[in-house]
Image (cartoon, rainbow, N blue to C red):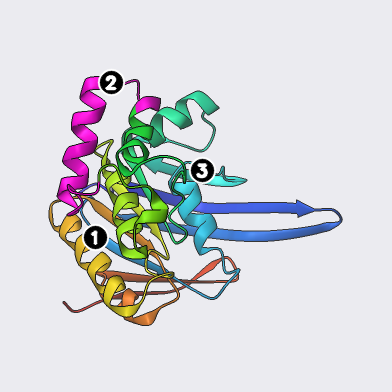
Amino acid sequence: MAALIDIKDLTRIYRLGDETLHALDGVSLQVRAGEFVAITGPSGSGKTTLANIIGGLDRPTGGSVVVDGNDLSHVRDGRLSAYRNRYVGFVFQSFNLQGTQTALENVMLPLVFARMRSKARKARAIECLQAVGLGDRLKHRPSQLSGGQRQRVAIARALAVKPQIIIADEPTGNLDSQRGAEIMKLLKDLNRQGITLLIITHDPGIARQAGRIIQIRDGKLAERQAVAL
């Protein structure tokens, strides 16, 4: 089976004044459609940079990143934005919700960028919130929701565009163990439905739930490990 994500000799260099930082240094890997992959490593290892490049939030300095036949290495901003809207849903540790908007409005937001009509946007957002168990919280703002509920809104927002890939960066980092376990169950359920799941984590317990663990250290792949499920 051809890889959904095919990365070869990926580098990302940041220049901070006179200092040069090699965030990624010659990374090559492949991810098949429907996989659940955990990307681990210490702070500053390059794991979030790798996720951001796969998600189209950052650009590589060198090498190639091909997702479902789309070469992201040198595309223009407009095409990169279209790629994000079509292929990728993001879930962040800090939720990244708009505090003045309701749960429904937050989930509708990426559908505005996708130019979906208003009636269809609302119907899709309600469907996604119901899918994560928040059909009775449509009009609640983030401040009226628990941490676990806010993360569920974030997952519903990620699902709104029907992505092939969900990238979750420390999705349980701001949650207690019970709420974190609930979020992981939800993400694994989505993966079982066919969505490719990439989780960036420093938590070994979270990583062990993946089908494969990729460890990054100092911008290089340190280890690849299959997990017995």
Q: How many residues crowd around disc 1 within 10 Å: few (fewer than 14), some, or many (20 or more)?
A: many
Q: Percent x, y for residue 8?
A: 46, 51
Q: Which residues are magenta?
A: 112-137
Q: Residue at x 26, y 27 (%)?
A: 121
Measure how far apart labels 3 and 2 are at the Cα level: 26 Å
Of the image marks 2 and 1, the number of the one nearer the N terminus: 2
* Residue depth check, mark 3 versus mark 2: number of the one nearer the observer: 2
Compared to residue 125, the image places residue 136 above or below, namely: below
Secondary structure found at label 3:
loop
Of the image marks 3 and 2, the number of the one nearer the N terminus: 3
Q: Residue at x 24, y 29 (%)?
A: 122
Q: Which mark is residue 227?
A: none
Q: Percent x, y for residue 57?
A: 51, 43
Q: Amino acid at mark 1?
A: Leu
Q: Residue at x 61, y 52 (%)?
A: 12
Q: Is residue 13 left or right of residue 35?
A: right
Q: Which quarter shows the C terminus?
A: bottom left
Secondary structure found at label 2:
helix
Which residue position is annotated with label 2?
A: 118
Q: Does the magenta segment cover residue 153?
A: no
Q: Does the magenta segment cover residue 125?
A: yes
Residue at the right extreme? 18
* Residue depth check, mark 1 versus mark 3: number of the one nearer the observer: 1
Q: Is residue 156 left or right of residue 192?
A: right
Q: Percent x, y for residue 217?
A: 55, 73
* Residue 76 visible in rendering: no
- Residues 52 and 152: in front is 152
Residue at the left extreme? 193
Q: Quadrant of residue 26?
A: bottom right
Which residue position is annotated with label 3?
A: 57
Of the image marks 1 and 3, the number of the one nearer the N terminus: 3
